[in-house]
Image (cartoon, grey):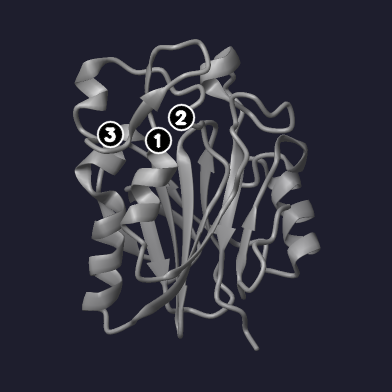
Amino acid sequence: MIRPPGFHGAAFGTARDGNGRDDPAARRTISAGLGISTEWAFLSQVHGDRVVAAMAPGPLGEADGAFTTVAGLPLTVATADCVPVILEGAGVAAVVHAGWRGAAAGVLLRARDAISAAGYSLTRAAIGAAIGPCCYEVGDEVADHFPGFTARTTWGTRSVDLPGYLAAQLADLTVWRSDVCTFTAGTLHSWRRDQTPHRQVAVAWLPTD
């Protein structure tokens, strides 16, 4: 697991760590390594903008963002090219799954609004490994949603910088960003690279002490 420096409860998995969202054995191993509960809260990810509050472990329904004020409750999303984002503040932790549809719909801003409406302020954000503009080939129907954040793939076609787009929505926070592209990194699952059904996880939690 990759632990962003300076964060109290944030970790990003690799392919080797397994899918702790869906695989209980992987969840136990990840939890033991991080020193957290094996009882996680998780989403049925639908590439939308719904954000929910998590008060207990287990399924949270269809959504792409979750936040908690419950100490010791791990939240998770699973990705294989989409952007995992972890948010931290005093008394609050959140996790967001942002593919292009969710990003365009404003899922990260919805998460920020939900946390603010609950009376909490964010201080840090971590953006995990995702497909980079070097490899995220898209058509105009996708690129047009992200003015100012289009680029070119290494083979010359139009692409989008999703991590950069999301980072711009976090400019008032301390932001850590992974510099790894899931498409080119052999240590990470990538749906675009090989249509894999496998995923790696991002886990966020409020420490109990």
Tell me the distance, in whole angstroms, between the alpha carbons under discs 3 and 2. 16 Å
Residue 111, picture quadrant? bottom left
Q: Amino acid at mark 3?
A: Arg
Circle number at residue 133 = 2
Q: Is residue 163 above or below residue 186?
A: below
Horizontally, is 180 left or right of 42 in the view?
right
Q: Is residue 157 above or below residue 84?
A: above
Q: Which badge, 3 or 2, is on the more N-terminal residue?
A: 3
Q: Amino acid at mark 2?
A: Pro
Which is more foreground, mark 3 or mark 1?
Answer: 1
Tell me the distance, in whole angstroms, between the alpha carbons under discs 2 and 1. 5 Å
Q: Residue at x 47, y 19 (%)?
A: 153
Q: Residue at x 38, y 27 (%)?
A: 151
144 vs 63, nearest the viewer: 144
Q: Assess whether mark 1 and mark 2 are in contact (beta carbons under 8 angstroms).
A: yes
Residue picked out by circle 3: 101
Q: Amino acid at mark 1?
A: Asp
40 vs 202, nearest the viewer: 202
Residue 75 placement (x, y as % from top left): 51, 60
Q: Residue at x 63, y 74 (%)?
A: 6
How crowded pointer 3 is (Cα within 10 Å; few <14, some 14-19, many 20+) is rated as: some
Residue picked out by circle 1: 161
SS at circle 3: helix
Horizontally, is 199 left or right of 145 in the view?
right
Q: Is residue 92 above or below residue 43?
A: below
Residue 81 placement (x, y as % from top left): 51, 31
Q: Which badge, 3 or 1, is on the more N-terminal residue?
A: 3
How crowded pointer 1 is (Cα within 10 Å; few <14, some 14-19, many 20+) is rated as: many
Tell me the distance, in whole angstroms, between the alpha carbons under discs 3 and 1. 13 Å
Location of the C terminus by quadrant is: bottom right
SS at circle 1: loop
150 vs 88, nearest the viewer: 150
